[in-house]
Image (cartoon, rainbow, N blue to C red):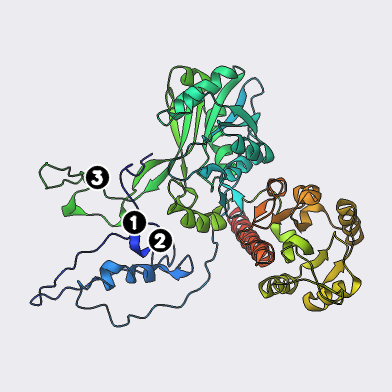
Amino acid sequence: MARPRKNAKRPRQGDNNSITKRRKVHSDDSKHITSLILARRGSKDIPLKNEILAGGWVIGWVLRVGAALDAGVFNSQGEDGKRPLQGDSHDNNSSTKRRKVHLDDSKHIAALILARGGSKGIPLKNIKMLAGVPLIGWVIRAALDSGVFHSVWVSTDHEDIAKVAKAWGAKVHKRCPSVSKDCSSSLEAIQEFSSKYPEVDIICNIQATSPCLHPYHLKEALELMTHQGFESVFSVVRRHHFRWQEVKKGECPITEPLNLDPSKRPRRQDWDGELCENGSFYFTTKKLVTEGLLQGGKITYFEMLPEFSVDIDVDIDWPVAEQRVLRFGYFGKDKPEVVKLLLCNVSGCLTDGQIHISANGDDMVSINTRDQTGINMLKKEGVKVILIEQNPIKKTLADKIYKWMGCEVLRDVDDILKKVEKLMKKDGLEWKEVAYMGNDEPDVKCLSLAGLSAVPLDAPVVALNAAKYSCHCAAGRGAVREFAEHILLLKKKAKSQMEQDRISRSSDNSILKN
């Protein structure tokens, strides 16, 4: 798929000094120059799509573009230059009906994720945290939960990537140095893997930088091979971009259209657009790989919707991808709306782990008001919160924490797993209904078993690898509030999807009756 030119520099987000300096344009006062933004109400593909994007109105982002308002090239800005109020985005994603894929046991089908350690755009980007999950974790989870692979592999030359891959349930293939160079191609790495594992008949090369991949994408794409006899299947996305011939230095400065007639410029809704590779995955046979092909034989494509087509190459893509994955990413099989209990460590989560001792011997801790608000938000939504302290603290301090936080505090907990299981049995809960926030080695088992789990930014690696979410905030600095917002976001997302599924079922039943 098309990638930015290597020499093309992009400004860092939020760094005004890195923004390309604009040349001042002097308007011809004899000519009235205005900007006109077309925003029709009746969009067919995305209803009222000019509304909300990343906390701001879509049309508002355009109005604020420096070329329109700051550069001073326009004589008018419209009647109202005010910025619209912010609002919430709503997930109106329709569910795709999923058909069960029956694996051909005579053929070994493997998922292969290439994750080299020497990324130039973003160092070690494959394990950089995206929405609380290592980037590579998103695609590993989708591949495992699809249930269509006999094995899921990560091919890497870096020990840290290998550790994260194993923690997320993938097997690790130690990539040969000869195919780990900057000039090495993906095909070369796939061929090297295929030669080491001759039992693999079909390989699905999944791109680690596609965090919005879902299990059903892989299921339905593989069906094209197992049910319809295709030899290679790859993912595409439909784009509505008008392309023009590049004008290179020293050539005639006049450009030519590549895919449109300017005299008959179509409206977006009247043009089917073009299918472009989005790089999410490539299914192919061992035979084709041996012949030096990723796409060959009987070829077809699997079309993914634009919202699931996310690719991350440079740092500036990261915040955009994080917003997208929170809305359209795959968060696992368990439904987050069933979370009924949050268990959270006091030391190392709610506080920074320090206990201060006064002159008269009293224990003192510091609690961030943001974390207190986060706990109140969960309680308001019906989630029970219990605080756990594994270190010995005085009852007077525990009572003060209870008074401030308004939730039960368990002191001197020795065997944390045993205690949590006792609490779950008492309330009749399963692990998928429990969210757990820990910060160190004693919490690892609970972090792994809980339906949702998190650690603060400064947690050690052993806890980080066991958690399903890693906070951007440190312990005692808003980590609990961040995890609370994450839980509530997933609950809202799941409820929205359930409502959409209910509407879809009602529509299907109406059609059947008619």
The residue carrying mark 1 is 269
Is the Cβ of the residue at disc 1 closer than 8 Å to that at disc 2?
yes
The kind of residue tagged 3 is: Asn
Asked whether the viewer can see residue 14, the reply is yes
Q: Quadrant of the N terminus?
A: top left
Q: Dot 3: within a 10 Å radius of its alpha carbon, few (fewer than 14), some, or many (20 or more) residues?
A: few
Tell me which corner region of the image, top left, top right, bottom left or bottom right, holds residue 469.
bottom right
Q: Determine which of the numbered discs, if any, sits on residue 259 in the image.
A: 3
Is the Cβ of the residue at disc 3 closer than 8 Å to that at disc 1?
no
Q: Quadrant of the C terminus?
A: bottom right
Asked whether the viewer can see residue 230, the reply is no
- Nearer to us of marks 3 and 1 is 3
Work out how far the residue at label 2 is from the one at label 3, CA to CA, in angstroms.
23 Å
268 or 55, nearer to the observer = 55
Q: Is residue 21 left or right of residue 176?
A: left
Choose the circle earlier in sequence order: 2 or 3: 2
Choose the circle earlier in sequence order: 3 or 1: 3
- In the image, residue 361 sits, relative to residue 169, either above or below, namely below
Q: Position of residue 382 (x, y in %)?
A: 76, 70
- In the image, residue 233 sits, relative to residue 59, either above or below, namely above
Choose the circle earlier in sequence order: 1 or 2: 2
Q: Is residue 90 left or right of residue 378?
A: left
Q: Determine which of the numbered discs, if any, sits on residue 44 in the image.
A: 2
- Secondary structure under tag 2 reads loop
Q: Is residue 44 left or right of residue 37?
A: right
The kind of residue tagged 1 is: Gln
Tell me which corner region of the image, top left, top right, bottom left or bottom right, holds residue 477.
bottom right
- Secondary structure under tag 1 reads helix
Q: Position of residue 93 (x, y in %)?
A: 54, 57
